[in-house]
Image (cartoon, rainbow, N blue to C red):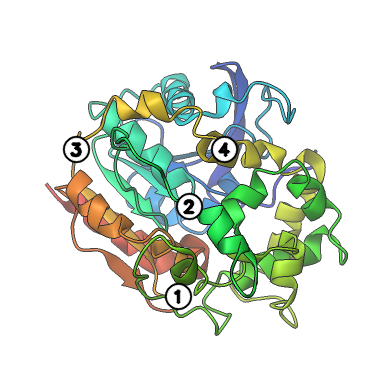
Amino acid sequence: MNALPLPEGIRARYLDGINGLRVHVLEAGQPGNPALLMLHGFPELAYSWRKVMPALAAAGYHVIAPDQRGYGRTTGWSDDYDGDLSPFRVFNLVRDAIGVLDACGVAKVEAVVGHDFGSPVAAWCTMLRPDIFTRMALMSSPFAGAPALPKPGAVPDIHAALAALPRPRKHYQWYYSERHATADMMNAPDGLHAFLRAYYHHKSADWPGNTPHPLPGWNAEALAQMPTYYIMDAAHSMPDAVAEAMPPGESPWLTDAELAVYAAEYARTGFQGGLQWYRTRTTGRFQAEQEIFAGKTIDVPAIFFSGASDWGVQQVPGALAKMRAACPHMGEIQLIPGAGHWVQQEQPEATVAMLLTLLAAG
């Protein structure tokens, strides 16, 4: 593998023996300084934090960003669709994070920062071990708290309702849980680089169709108001869904050279490692262990922010209100103009400002 084209001040190394993994991490800043742990989402990498790490290091922090289980240059995980999903359940991802910190000689962090699917991992880190994770920043994906204990009664079948719409639809998370999803993306008609270009563009502030607003409820008619990268046409793959948003060229916040890093990494690893995370959620197989914490709050200083053009904030109706209840020490929710879902890449200066505000809080 070629060395990653990293900004000045960011270094890469491997940590062996981390909960069965060899973890690839990016770091910036002086070891021994107050530490920050940055957890990426899908389809991203530790590389996604490249624009904010140097500024946080310059502010006096030791910034640690791993390729999480299933991603990038971290090895030791299985992409077997028929294999054991339990290593990808969220409690084990928390164990991965603690192992990374221990290997870096860090007993606690000033904040754990999670974006996209890294957001619930950061939230569970803080709920389970507030002695280690003393502040929390969640980005783009609200954390609605530990799942409530189930009540008797039938649960409406949202998938049947989506399929029965006049324009039949399906939910992207359940599509991502299907066996063929990774092959669909790896074999996108215009190639992997073009698929990722369209995917990142479609969910960014550059695409004018991203005008999120609160949805009235978890029902087919409400969910179908979202763009097709979330509520897909029933017959479409994800490459089909984002093809309509193919931009004419590179974006100033994600150049072709930067995009080539993502394309090369996913060309090598495939997407199934990241998609295993979705399957742990959609199967419901590990929900019972999370229900042990039903009603428990996260009692550390916290912040939530995202791009003003990010539908991820609204994709689960009611999640923001539930997050408020689950995180009583969270400040005002902040939506950053000029950013969509990829806020730390689209608006890195604003992202750094948000994080430094949290870190300055008592």
- The total of numbered circles placed on residues is 4
Position of residue 37 relative to residue 194, above or below, is: above
Which residue occupies 57% across, 23% down? 87
Pointer 3 residue: 297
The residue mark sitting in front, 2 or 4, is 4
Q: Label 2: few (<14), some or many (≥20) within 10 Å?
A: many
Is residue 29 in sight in this rendering?
Answer: no
Pointer 1 residue: 309
Q: Is residue 37 left or right of residue 261?
A: left
Real-space CA distance between mark 2 and mark 3, rounded to the nearest whole angstrom? 21 Å
Pointer 2 residue: 116
Q: Is residue 343 left or right of residue 301?
A: right
Label 4 amino acid?
Trp
Label 1 amino acid?
Ser
**Location of residue 53 in the rendering, given as x and y in whole percent from the top left corner:** 46, 51
Pointer 4 residue: 277
Which residue occupies 20% across, 35% down? 295
Q: Label 4: few (<14), some or many (≥20) within 10 Å?
A: many
The residue mark sitting in front, 3 or 1, is 3
Label 2 amino acid?
Asp
User: Residue at the left extreme?
Assistant: 362
Task: Identify the image quadrant of residue 163.
Answer: bottom right
